[in-house]
Amino acid sequence: MISKLRPAKRILPFFLSLFFTASVALAVDKDISQPVPELSPNLQQAIASVHVVQLLSKSHYRKVPLDQEHVEKVFDRYLDRLDPNRSFFLQSDIDEFAPYRKQLGELLKSGDLNPAFAIFNRYRERAEERARFMLDQLDKNFASLDLKKNESLIIERKDEPWLTDRKAQQDLWDKQFKDSVLSQKLNHKTDDEIISQLRRRNSNLLRRLHQSKSEDAFQTYINAFAGIYDPHTQYFSPQTAENFDINMSLSLEGIGAVLSSEDEYTKVVSVVPGGPAEKAGQLKPGDKIISVAQGKKGELEDVVGMRLDDVVKLIRGAKRTLVRLEIIPGSSKDSSTRVYEIVRDQVKLEEQDASSRVIELTDNGKTNRIGVIELPTFYIDFKAAQSGDPDYKSTTRDVRRLIKALEKKNIDGLVIDLRGNGGGSLQEANELTGLFIDKGPTVIVRNSRGRSDQQEDPDSTQLYDGPMVVMIDRLSASASEIFAGAMQDYGRALVVGSQSYGKGTVQSIQPLNHGQLKLTLAKFYRVSGQSTQNRGVIPDITFPSLYDGRDIGEDTLPDALPWDNISPASFRPYADFSPYLPELQKKHASRTRDNADFVYLHEMKDYFEHYENQKTVSLSSEKRQLELQTMRSQRLAIENRLRKSRGQSLLNNLDELEEANETELEQKKKDKEPDAFLQETGVILSDMIKATDNKQLFTRRSQ
């Protein structure tokens, strides 16, 4: 099993590749004036494809027959990976490829990759035509561009029909060109700056196409096939397999971010707890990186259209050196950009350590001291543990120490904060659960043959038996879900927050003659028999979340394994919170109805949902400007309502927001002030303590 149980998107597998220490020069520039050369498969790839088919058929948790339905799905997924926005292929291309739709099953089994490469080469041909069209537009039509015409562009085209002919294709490209120019103009760029940037951008696209290797085609095709099993099953080429092996050690340097390639952009998937980007507090999941610069004075280099591995080479670098990233915030819909400065550093295990504090809450003259343990990840120093080091670091050891220290401070209850915790060691999730129960199962692991094995609490003592709440959010995944689910099933803790990520599967790395295959072998189940897969853990008391309804979570991924349940394990719960929940929920709703932070979150959620669901943008400069002014004024009003409630100075415009947030974040860190959601969690716990006073709530109940 892979010990790092983190949520994964369908991304190019450079999982933590920004940590590498070497700063490597980009590939030698090629003559992009020449047509893009065709690529062809090699024998090693053909053999590897047969091995992948055999391994998935025999070993994957999900049994997928290579029947006509699934073969056609592979075909469609391959086209989606190459042209997700349907901006390149013509309907005539799709018609030409149609015979392959029924043949891919037998072709995969035999290792015949020629049709896959034919489709890939056609994609590169169309992409080259588009890049040259854009460069031609810059040379010939930029000065006469009509941005007053009342027309619009469909920006979400995944469900649109394929382009009917060359005219429809060029009409689309013409609108996309106008959109690129208009976005730059609205971002206060001069005409010369726009021409220069768009020329570099499309030249980069051509350069990327010239630098394509046969391995790019092979990896894309095999992952289209592997993806029909589940989104976490992936083929790694020899190069990316080497990167993955290095990444898993965590003894690396860089900014601490996970990147993916999405259309022409490099997108931030997540930031690593304890890494430079996370500590800087600026870079967020969903941000798109459009330019990179070295040091304070280095020139920003446009990276739109650049290969992901080349972008990585620009961003990574030596410890204590500065990199500047120009990004389009994922939370922004107005194409405005920000430039963030991040000092590269090593991501140290101790930066992800559990930490604790005490918050005091007073109600009707009674003060409750609430202990809080924040847990960014489930970690263990495997090497030290295996070598017999008696002082090796682990989550459970650190939490044990912190609880003992908190109990000396006479805490009345405990909060375990798992927000943003993407998982980690299964062993640690098991052992941490054991700190809060005296004995019993902690999780059930079911393999592809249907055999179920229970993990048991390895320690018969119960370290902490007092009132407890576990906080989760949409980014809490894998090991976090195992622990939170166990605490909920045992009745050892209330769970509050938002629905967790829903990754309840186990992956393993299998070597091939050429690269590696990561495949799903097993599934997690709670002791109640419920899967954590797809559905995640549902809180007892729910907080609003900006991630609700957005493209985050297992249930948003194609072909994710379904939620199901099996026979429960034999266990005895401690408490039944159901008699107390209605009153606790009523008090929570009453408190937060007018709570400025909760109101803000609801307003921001509605704001994002409204604008993210828009499928088109106007290409009229006047209309687009008005739309953006409306958006920005709505956002400014939401931000200022929150700031007014906190007694903070109001913003004149959104440009002041980033600087204000950065200053206030630093002050909060310095003051160790609990955020509104941790504060409310503490109050919920205080309510629970009061409601259950002297009721023997945590005495074992018979099953």
Image (spheres, grey):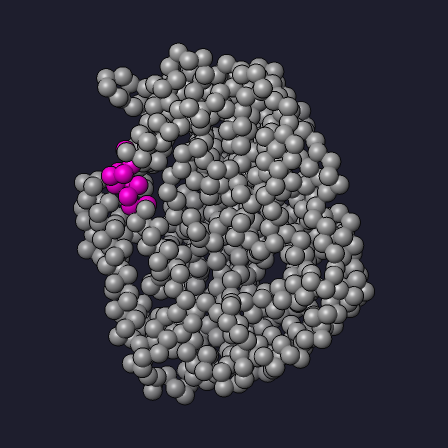
Residue 594 counted in the magenta span: yes
Q: Residue at x 43, y 40 (%)?
A: 498
Depth check: 292 or 187 in front? 187
Identify the residue at image location x=63%, y=52%: 230
Residue 541 x/y as whole percent = 40, 34
Q: Quadrant of residue 683?
A: top left
The chief SS type of the magenta part is helix
Is 171 part of what is drawn in magenta?
no
Q: Position of residue 693 (x, y in %)?
A: 37, 14
Quarter of the rendering occupied by the N terminus:
top right
Q: Position of residue 165 (x, y in %)?
A: 54, 84
671 lies left or right of 344: left
What is the count of numbered marks?
0
In the picture, the quarter occupied by the C terminus is top right
As drawn, 548 above or below 697: below
* Magenta segment boundaries in residue numbering: 591-601
Q: Going 47% across and 33% down the picture, which residue do you hit? A: 375
**Left or right of 358 in this view: 252:** right
